[in-house]
Image (cartoon, helix red, strand yellow):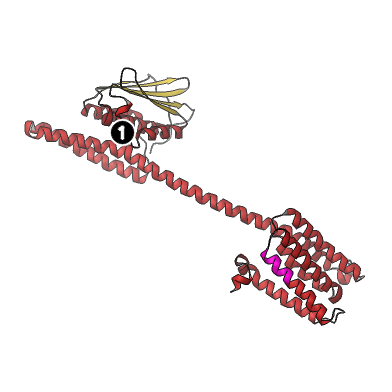
Amino acid sequence: MFYKLYPRDQIKNYLLIDIILTVFLCYRVFNSDTALGLWGTLLVLLLFLASFYVALWRRGGWLLAASLSGLSAIAVFGVYAGPSTMLFGIIFADLLGRSKSKAHIAIGSAAIALSFLLVFVIRQEPLLETSNAIYLPVMIIQSVYPIVIYIKEKAKSLQGELDEANEQIAKYIQQEERQRIARDLHDTLGQTLMMIKMKSELATKWVDKDPSQAKRELGEILDTSRTALKQVRELVSDMKFISLASELDHSAKLLHTAGIALSIENPEKPPLLSSVEETMLALCVREAMTNIIKHSRAKRCAVKLETKDHAFGIHIADDGVGLAGHGGGNGLPSIMERMKTLGGSSAIDPLPQGGTKVYLKLPLRRHEKEDAS
């Protein structure tokens, strides 16, 4: 019921205060023997209540007009019932502060000060005499109060916008984290499980022809399964450091199993990379190798690492069927996304003689090697 008479957002903080002030004002004016008489007092009080109700619900010009009307009613009471009724102007000072217009607040603050001055001029009472000394600070407080409320409401609004922005950022971070986990599962476990699949197929072929070879393949499957379990633990805890050298060594074994010859050309003095940079590059290499094994039908693969023009580059080329043989999925986009995250670049192009070339370029920065642990 009260929601229809009083704004929902103000019930908690202002309803009780406004009721108390209104009751005291009514008691004050009806308890005074004024020239207004009963009907005059009722009419002015009705103007006050109507102005208060309009100012409570409306904004913009209606709020300013209602506040000026309400202040006028209080000033009339101040003239006829005594300046003590001017204390109730705080009601409209508070409502004025909720205006969204600085000009309206300035006009309302000036009107509050003017209403005080008019009351004392009409009553011919000096504002600064000892008996009226309290009204000067009251006038100043009421005149400044709308500005204080405006700043408070503005800060509240900005805080709400900030909270909303933080909520959106949290959702974005959550979405990015989900994408990262999906990408890491695809890049890391996908390759390891594919190796288990290939080893299982080899073991099946050798089980009748050469049991000892099949046994060796099964042993490698066991080792690879342990690697997969370790990778799952690392993904659960967070992305761990992966060295580029170890990833290239792992890729060589994987390509050998798939029947693809790999040649690697390393610079004499490799650049100093941060753990994050080296891990991301290693994962890009892993994804490129996975795509070669899955889609290229290549016989040879060449990897060249070089440092040139303050940038570290990795060239990966195969002699397979080219980009036409690549299926969909997270592979190639994840390479581009990782390099973009590092501030580097990537290119995946077909070779004139057939096959595909992947080029990763990372600008070099001066930094200490991070702790990989």
Q: Which residue is mark 1?
A: 327
Q: Residue drawn at (61%, 69%), measured in percent from left and top? A: 12
Check disc 1: other Cα within 10 Å, few if <14, some if 14-19, many if 20+. Answer: few
Picture layout, residue 5 above or below residue 192: below
Q: Is residue 131 visible?
A: yes
Q: Majority secondary structure of the magenta segment?
A: helix
Query: Would residue 56 appear left or right of 255 to someone viewing this image?
Result: right
Picture layout, residue 85 above or below residue 224: below
Query: Would residue 98 appear left or right of 230 to someone viewing this image?
Result: right
Magenta segment includes 31 = no
Q: Residue furthest right?
A: 124
Magenta segment includes 52 = yes
**Magenta residue span:** 50-58
Q: Residue drawn at (45%, 29%), measured in percent from left and top? A: 344
Horizontal and vertical percent position of residue 5? 63, 71
Query: Would residue 290 appear left or right of 114 to someone viewing this image?
Result: left
Secondary element type, mark 1: loop
Q: Residue drawn at (65%, 69%), measured in percent from left and top? A: 14
Quarter in which the N terminus is drawn: bottom right
